[in-house]
Every structure is written in C-alpha cells, then in structure tokens.
Image (tube, helix red, strand yellow):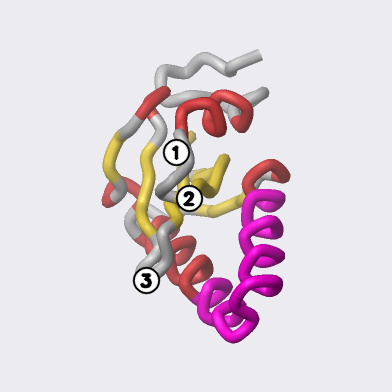
Amino acid sequence: MRYRIQVNPVASGHVANAIARYRAEAPERVARFVARFAEARNCIRACPFLGRTGPHGLRHVALRVFPHELWYVIDGQVVTVVAVTHFRQDADPVLRDSLDGVRLPHGNPTD
C-alpha cells in the first residue's frame, strides 16, 4: 500500500521553531536537522506502522541524532504529522494542542 504524507500547520510550526533555535544556537546543525526530519518523514511514509504507539493513539518516531520526535496519525492511506516535540518537553500538552480537527485512530475527530 502506498501512503501519502502530510505535515499539518502546527507540526510545521514546531519544525520552524526548532530550526530557528538551531539557527540561533548552532547554525552548523540546521541543514543536518532538516535532513533528519526529511529522513524520518520518508521513513514513516514507507512504513508508517514502524513507529511506537503513544498517547492519544498517535504513533511516533525519533529523529536520528537530534532529540526530537515526530508524532503522527494514520488515516487510511494518509499519514499526518501532527507534532514535533523535543525530548525535554512534556509531550502530552503539546499533543493535545496539536490535535484540533485531527482524525484519531479510533475514528473520531477531536473537534
């Protein structure tokens, strides 16, 4: 089965914030962070059930080398990245804030 991947606006904001942090604190790491994000995104496109199941029924995978995780939901043939968290964050509040209108695995939208 072929999956289509999308990154919702909230998750895109999380990525932009992480890039801005790296640009300010370690600019030499920005390109590598972007490459690892793309690598993780391609990994879940190819094999979305690889990620572990976490809160709210979301799946997640870690970025290699960087302390971030991509959180996503699978709905049919569409995989939606809903959040990107740092390992030091309490992921649950970030995830709750990222789920507005997202169709969760149990088939119920959050709104």
Q: Is residue 31 magenta?
A: yes
Residue 45 left/right relative to 110: left
Distance (Cα) linking label 1 and label 2: 21 Å
- Quick one: which residue is furthest to the bottom in this view? 28
Residue at the (55%, 53%) spot, across then down: 5
| Secondary structure under the numbered disc 2 in the rendered image | strand
Which portion, as a residue range, is magenta?
12-35
Q: Is residue 100 magenta?
A: no
| Image coordinates for residue 8, horizontal then vertical, percent | 66, 44
Residue at the (41%, 59%) spot, across then down: 67
- Where does label 3 land, which residue? 65
Q: Amino acid at mark 3?
A: Val
Q: Majority secondary structure of the magenta segment?
A: helix
- Where does label 1 land, which residue? 74
Is the C terminus in the top left, top right, bottom left or bottom right quadrant?
top right
| Image coordinates for residue 97, horizontal then vertical, percent | 62, 27
